[in-house]
Image (cartoon, grey):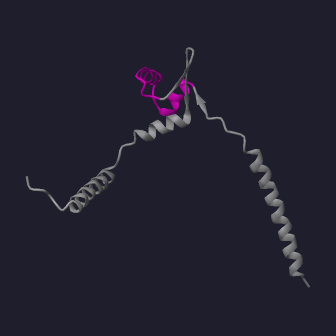
Amino acid sequence: MHNPFQEIAERLNSIESILADLQKVATSATTPIEPELLDVAQAASFLRLTTQTVYDKVHARTLPHVKQGNRIYFFKDELIGWLKAGRQQTVEQQTDQAREVIAASVARRQRKGGRSSS
């Protein structure tokens, strides 16, 4: 006959072992992760632009970059942020935003007692 308390004890030992392993991984993973650094060619490839376009955007200061001496570097996470900042809204998103602005304007007017006749 199988002892259920023995099975519980075995499972508990297994869980404790897994937790100890996770704790070791968590403490070893506390070292800061260096952001990925790209050169011009890598940045151009990542952004799917020509290297000349990357240089043009650096010259116009529209692309986030780091300059060390004669070398230009890019942090990949900053390039991703730059891409996200330029994201265009869909027509549906623009319509929703317009409705929110109109609703807020109407609510302000109603709080002020409606339109004033001038």
Please identify the residue farthest to the bottom as the structure is shown. 1
**In magenta segment, residue 98:** no
Please identify the residue farthest to the left as the structure is shown. 118
Q: How many marks?
A: 0
SS assignment for the magenta stretch, majority: helix
Residue 39, placed above or below residue 25: above
In this rendered view, identify the residue nearer to me: 18 or 40: 18
The answer to whether 48 appears left or right of 68 in the picture is left
Residue 116, placed above or below residue 78: below
Please identify the residue farthest to the top as the structure is shown. 70
Rendered location of residue 22, percent (x, y) = 77, 55
**In magenta segment, residue 56:** yes
The answer to whether 90 appears left or right of 55 in the picture is left
Which picture quadrant has residue 31?
Answer: top right
At a point 35% along the width and 47% down the height, the residue shown is: 89
Please identify the residue farthest to the right as the structure is shown. 1
Rendered location of residue 56, percent (x, y) = 42, 21
Rendered location of residue 118, percent (x, y) = 7, 52
At a point 40% along the width and 22% down the height, the residue shown is: 60
Q: In which quarter of the image is the N terminus?
A: bottom right
Residue 118, placed above or below residue 37: below
Magenta stretch bounds: 39-63
The answer to whether 109 appears left or right of 61 in the picture is left
Rendered location of residue 46, percent (x, y) = 52, 33
At a point 48% along the width and 33% down the height, the residue shown is: 47
In this rendered view, identify the residue nearer to me: 45 or 61: 61
